[in-house]
Amino acid sequence: MSVVASPTSISHLPSAAASAALPVDILRFNTCGSVDDGKSTLIGRLLYDSKSLMEDQLEALERSADITGGGQINLANITDGLRAEREQGITIDVAYRYFATPRRKFIIADTPGHVQYTRNMVTGASSANLSIVLVDARTGVIEQSRRHTAIASLLRIPHLVVAVNKMDLVGWSEARFLEIRAQFEEFLPRLDIKDVKFIPLSALTGDNVVDASPHTPWYVGPTLLGHLETVHIASDWNLTGFRLPVQWVNRPNNPTDPKLHDFRGFSGQIAGGIVRTGQKVTALPAGLSTTVKEIWTYDGPVQEAFCPQSVTLVLEHDIDISRGNMLIGADHLPGASSDLIADVCWMHPRPLQRGRKYFLKHTSQTVQVAVTEITHRLEMATLDPESEPAELAMNDIGQIRLRAARPLVFDGYATNRLTGSFILIEQGTNATVAAGMLQPPREIVKPEGGDYAI
């Protein structure tokens, strides 16, 4: 849940802090690929060479016997913190790390390469702007390479980097690099990824990671960090069609402050578009329309806000709105339906079968659903769909149809990743069993409540 400030805390925010709290350019990216392709080592190299590690972190690595026989720090252990990960030399859980350069801030998700941890890879990549698929230069493209690239496409990650790692073990061969690029280009046209960059590197030695390598005079592109610092992400957010799923009705009711005594705002994270004071908005499912009177953020009142900011809106009229409702703009209307078609990644040992009932968590609301059909399962070896399978097993990716207890207001995932995504929750255990991406709705919302009348 997003944290949204009430005017109580805003009124005491120092002006210096308010001026410093400006929007920050943050790139979220994940690393993926097969086992032992060097994902954790690559992240460690990024942090190490960009001088983003604290002295106590380096000392902790040395104290925990992370020095290899060659006298080098085992950079993979910067992210592989579990005992089982260090013993086996693999990544099991998703590890998040943060670092910054003068150009940009970064949030990294180190995701597992094992097939049995595909669900963890989906979790780590779900909010990424960019995905790095590592490929061992010796083995080339394998099934896991195709699997993770297909998942990046399914999750609509806008930018993809194919990092051909361990180039030092193939003599920095340009022919081998071009061969691997050709293997990717054979199946990339079948996927919906528009921005793809190929970079030859060695995570262990640091070539082409932060600094350019003298071993690849035939490569004229940027280093990995150089690309991460300059890739254009400003247009990745959906800025058309205002959406605000209401998370909380903000009622400070402070009797000592006249401004806050009767304050009533609607808080949440903007899931799409731009909102301005004086703009007409409609509350769904009621369908009543009014205008925006005030927009509050943690830094104080503003005249406009945009996705993905967290805000509190004060409306001109007191409309009955509660958690789970959605405020929308007058243009680019969403859809509404009880019959849902979705791509899902199944995450639970108990398989998904037709007729099962679950709770579906969508934006800020939860509704009961039943699985009416399993349309197909994606065969990762070929990327071909298997029609009408009996079930979806753990880590399977497929398409299903759901029947909801009440209509959902949503956009297709390809249009809006925030209002087009959901999770399924098992009844009784409250375990998260699947992550899903909604297909575009068949019917567009047509508000029937009209403008609010006093």
Image (tube, grey):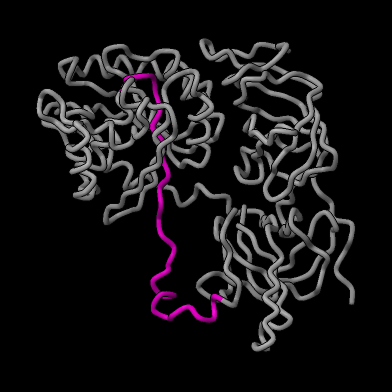
Decide which of 130, 126 is in the foreground and name it: 126
Left or right of 197, for residue 417 = right
Left or right of 17, for residue 374 = right
- How far across and how far down the image is residue 230, in percent? 33, 47
Residue at left offset 42%, top offset 34%: 131
Residue at left offset 64%, top offset 30%: 434
The reply to whether residue 191 is visible in this rendering is: yes
Q: Quadrant of residue 401?
A: top right
- How far across and how far down the image is residue 341, in percent? 74, 30
Quadrant showing the C terminus: bottom right
Q: How many marks?
A: 0
- How far across and how far down the image is residue 133, in percent? 38, 27
Relative to 229, does residue 126 appear above or below in the rendering?
A: above
Q: Quadrant of residue 88?
A: top left
Residue at left offset 25%, top offset 35%: 221
Magenta region: 9-37
Decide which of 60, 143 is in the foreground and name it: 60
Q: Quadrant of residue 373?
A: top right
Relative to 255, does residue 42 appear above or below in the rendering?
A: above
Left or right of 64, for residue 345 = right
Question: Residue 41 colored magenta?
Answer: no
Residue at left offset 32%, top offset 16%: 180
The reply to whether residue 438 is visible in this rendering is: no
Left or right of 134, for residue 127 = right
Question: Residue 13 colored magenta?
Answer: yes
- How far across and how far down the image is residue 237, in percent? 53, 50
